Amino acid sequence: MTETADQIFVLLKHWLVAFAPAKWQPLFSMLISAAAIVGGFAGLFALTTILERKGLGRIQNRYGPNRVGPFGLLQPLADGVKSLTKEDIIPRSADQIVHFIAPLVLVGPVFLALAVIPMGRNLVAADLDAGVLFFLAAGAATELSVFMAGWSSRNKYSMLGAMRAIAQMISYEVPLILSAVTVVMMAGSLSTVTIVETQSGYTGFLPNWYVLTPWGLAGFLLFLIAALAESNRSPFDLPEGESEIIAGYYIEYSGFKFALFFLGEYIGMFAISGMAVTLFLGGWHAPFAFLGWVPSYLWFFGKLLALICLFIWIRGTLPRLRMDQLMNFAWKFMVPLTLVNIVVAGCWRFMEPGFARWVACGVLIAAPAAILAHVLAAKGKIHRRVYRYAD
Amino acid sequence: MFGEGIAKGMAETARNFFGSYVSKERLVTVQYPEQRLPQKEAARNFPFLVYDGPAWDTGLRCVACQICEKECPPQCIFIVKDAVKKPDYAGKMQFQPKVFDIDTSVCMSCQICVEVCPFDAIKMDVEFELSTADRFGGLLIQKRELAKPNDYYHKIHPMEAAEVDGRLAVEKAKTEAKAKADAAARATVAAAKPAPVPASA
C-alpha cells in the first residue's frame, strides 16, 4: 500500500503509456512527463502567487487578497483571466520578433531545468548522467531571454534592467556553481538521482543530508543566497526594482506575455529551490526514519514549499541592495567563500570521521567567513564626506 | 556579529506575520464595501446644490449668478440662466439656473465654488462612490442629481449647516423687518398725503 502510494505517479504513467503502440511509447512517455511537469508546476505557480501575496500581506499587517473565492484562494484564477484578456501592446519601435520570442525563451529553459530534478523515488523526467551540469546550463540560458526582452523593447528602463540582470546573474552564477561543486565532489556524480541516493540513510536519528555537515551548511547558505540572486528575488531584485526602474526588462510587456515572464521567474525559482533540495536537503528523503512511509514526492514538495516560504519571508524583510553592494558581495564575499568551501569539502572527505573532523571543518569555513565579513564591513563603513573646496 | 541585522529583521517580520493572526489590533484594514468608517465632519468630495422646502426645483437657493462658474479653477461648472424668475427663501424674486452641470471628471474638490457663493447655495458633498460605466454622460452631473435637500446638508455637515441656517435666518429676519419698515414708511407717507396730487396738477 505504502509502496503504491509512493509510486502512484510512476504507475499511472506506465498504465497510460501502455495504451500507445510500442513504437511510440518512448515519445509518449516523454510527452506525459513534460505535460505533468508543465501542469504541476503551473499549478504550484498559482498557489505560490496567492501564498506570496497573503504572506507578504500578513508580514505587513494586512489581509492580502481575500475577495475572490473563499479566503481569496481563487485570486490566481482571476489574475489569469485578467492577463489573458488584457490588450497585448508591442511598442512600435520595438524589435518585433525578439520582443515576441523573449518570454518563450525564458519559459522554455526553466521548464527544461525542472526535467532533471528528482521529485520522488523514480520520479524524474530525465535521469541524465550530467544532470547538475544540464540544470546549470539551462538555468544560465534565462539570461539570454532577459537581455532579449530588455534590448528589444527599446526602452531605457528595460535596457537598464537588462544590464543589471546580466551583471547580477553572471556574477552570482559563479558562487552558485562553485557551491554546487562541493556536493558533486562528495557524491562523486553529476547525476541528480545519484546525488539524492548518496544522501539516503540515517546516522543515529539524523538523516545523512549534506546540509548537516559544516561544508554542506555553508554550501547550502551560499547556494541559497546565489539562488535568490539568480531568480531575481528580493533583496537582489535590482533588475526589476519597481521603485527605480519600474519593472526593469519586462516594462514593455503586457497581457499574457507579462504573465509568461512572471511564470518563468517563478518556475525558475522552483527549479533552483528544487535543486537546493536535491543537492543539500536530501531530495525526496524523509527527515526521520520513522516517517519513511510518507510518499517521497510529498517530502520533496514539502521541502520545496518550505524554501519558497523562506524566499517570501526574506522578500518581506530585506530591502533592496545597491548595485555596488551586490557586486562586492558576489565577488569579494561569495566567491572566496565558495572556493574555501571546496577545500573544506576536500578536508572532510579525507579526514577520519569523528568529532575532530567536525571541529576542523567548522573552523575552516567559519573563520574565513568571519574574517571576510569583518574586513568587508570595516571597508564599507560610511565616513563623513569631506569636501575639498566647498566648506 | 555578521548577519545580526538580518536575523533581527526576520524575527520582526515573523512576529508581524504570526501576530496578525492572533491580535486583531494589528490588522487595521477596514474591509471597505462591507465595513465603513464613520464619515468625518470636515470630509468633502464634490459639490451639490442645496434646496429648501420640499420641491427641489423651486427650492434651489442658486440664483444663477455664475460666480462659481467663473471662479472654478478647472472650469467644470456650466450654468445657463433661466429667463423666468422665482422667489428665494426671503420672498425676493431672483433668477434661477436653467442648466447647472458639473463634470466630475474635471472637478478637483477644491471647494472654491463653495467659498465664493454669496447665497450658500452650493456646498460640498461627502459622496465618493461616483464611478460609472459611461465616461461621458455618466460623469456629467446635472441639476436634478446635484440638488439635495437642506436636511441632507444637516446630516453630513451638522455644524456648518446650523451656522448657515442661522445666518440665513438672521438675513431673512432683516429683510422682513426692512420690508415691514418700508411698508410702514410707505403707509405713513400715504397717511401724510391722503390725496396724492396728480403730477400734472
Image (spheres, coloured by chain):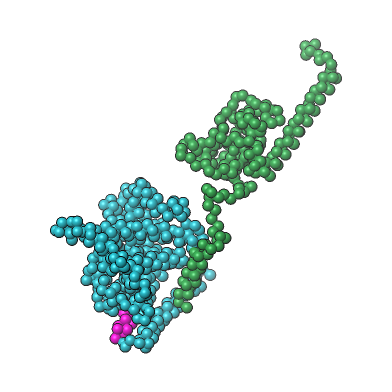
Chain colours: A cyan, B green
- Decide: is B64 above or below A312: above
As for residue A225 lying within the magenta part, the answer is no
Q: Is residue A321 left or right of residue B25?
A: left
- Residue in the foreground of this view, choosing between A4 and A212: A4
Q: Is residue A277 visible?
A: no
Residue in view at x 71 percent, y 36 percent:
B168
Q: Is residue A117 above or below residue B194?
A: below
Left or right, A91 with respect to B133, comes to: left
Residue occupying image coordinates x 37% and y 54%? A251
State the image coordinates of residue A313 (x, y, percent, origin top left).
44, 66
Asked where in the image residue A231 lies, by quadrant, the reply is bottom left
**Residue at the location (46% across, 37% down)?**
B134
List the single residue furthest toward the right: B192
**In the picture provided, is A78 more to the left or to the right than B200?**
left
Q: Residue B40 location, x and y as percent?
A: 62, 49
Query: Residue A240: x and y, percent?
Result: 39, 60
Q: Quadrant of the C terminus of chain B?
A: top right
Q: Give the quarter of the image for residue A101.
A: bottom left
Q: Residue A145 or A361: which is nearer the viewer? A: A361
| Magenta stretch in the rendered image | A341-350
Of residue A243 and residue A93, the one placed in the foreground of this image is A243
- Residue A121 seen in this snapshot: yes
